[in-house]
Image (cartoon, grey):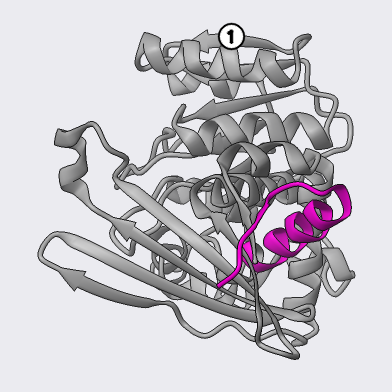
Amino acid sequence: MLILNNEQISSLLSLEEITAAVESAMVSYENQSSSVPRRMHLDHGENTLLCMPSFGGGYFATKLVSVVPGNKNKALPVTNGALLLNDAETGLPLALMNAAKLTALRTGALGAVGIRYMTPANIDSIGLIGTGVQGLHQAIFACSVRPIQTIYSLYRQAEGFEKLRYFVQQHYPAVKVVACKMAEELLEKTEVLIAATTSASPVLPNDAALLRGKHFISIGSYKPNMQELPAAVYQLAGQLAIDSEFARHETGDIINAVERGWVLAENVYTIGKLITGARQIDVHQTTAYKSAGMALYDLFTARALYQKAVETGIGVEVAL
């Protein structure tokens, strides 16, 4: 079995290759050639264990993630995890991978797919709200699918902004990162807004005049009581792309949009339908995309990482 650590996962594939793996997963999902059971939650006090299996593409994978809030007080990561990749035909374990970096990469690719299929091809800037791990990866993946020259970042803390600027410069030295103090300033300067926060309430003003004709990607909110984007976004767009059918019942951005009549249920569809051509949109009008993640994206990204690792001789082989 092959062991791949954080650093190895970071360097094995290009951003474009990771996005291609995620797109392949989306097509597989649309074609129903894969299987994704609902993820399992096990709670123990304030701690949570998540078990996320998936099958497809000749492999199956199980991602195990622990969420331990008390780790904040111990200078340890709150979220940790590992992914086990198996051969679908024999069931033999093939690889064990650091799940944190894998998740960050595939989540960045999920945002990139939204930009690729739901924005004009010539956009050269984005607005970013959130400078955590997800925000950092959204920034560089956006640069990999569009000719981005400037990233406008909502300025909350100097440490987060400097971390974002450094991270972007490591990957795209020519891209400028500019601080903005208000969300309204982001909306004035760019057409594409990416929200990568854990906010329970909208991070943009509910003002149709400011929101009209722009493109919105929500990556961060992940619970029914969380809603990153304001009602006017959904009302202006008239439709909403999501990354899995599971997302309909998992996040407030989708639940509220449908239950409150901002978007008709039949106008909420998986973004894979844009990739396969089953649906079309006008990218010069307001668009909205909500990603909640799915184990299948981890599987297809892990498959690509494993195949490249075997091809290049990267990783450590261990006998079980």
The question of residue 48 being in magenta is answered with: no
**Depth order, front residue of 17/315:** 315
Q: Position of residue 150 (x, y in %)?
A: 71, 15
The residue located at (57%, 77%) in the rendering is 245
Examine the image and state in which quarter residue 273 appears: bottom right
The residue located at (81%, 39%) in the rendering is 14
Q: Looking at the image, is 79 positioned above or below residue 29?
A: above
**Depth order, front residue of 31/194:** 31
Examine the image and state in which quarter residue 257 appears: bottom left
Name the residue that disc number 1 marks: 178
Q: Quadrant of the N terminus?
A: bottom right
Stretch of the chain drawn in magenta: 298-320
**Depth order, front residue of 142/183:** 142
The question of residue 317 being in magenta is answered with: yes
Q: Position of residue 170 (x, y in %)?
A: 68, 16
The residue located at (60%, 19%) in the rendering is 167
**Depth order, front residue of 13/89:** 89
Horizontally, residue 122 falls left or right of residue 18, namely right
Q: Position of residue 267 (x, y in %)?
A: 64, 71
User: Is residue 286 in sight in this rendering?
Assistant: yes
Q: Looking at the image, is 300 positioned above or below residue 92?
A: above
Horizontally, residue 186 falls left or right of residue 226, namely right
Q: How many other residues sit within 10 Å of disc 1, few (<14), some (14-19) or many (≥20)?
A: some
Dot 1 lies on which element? strand
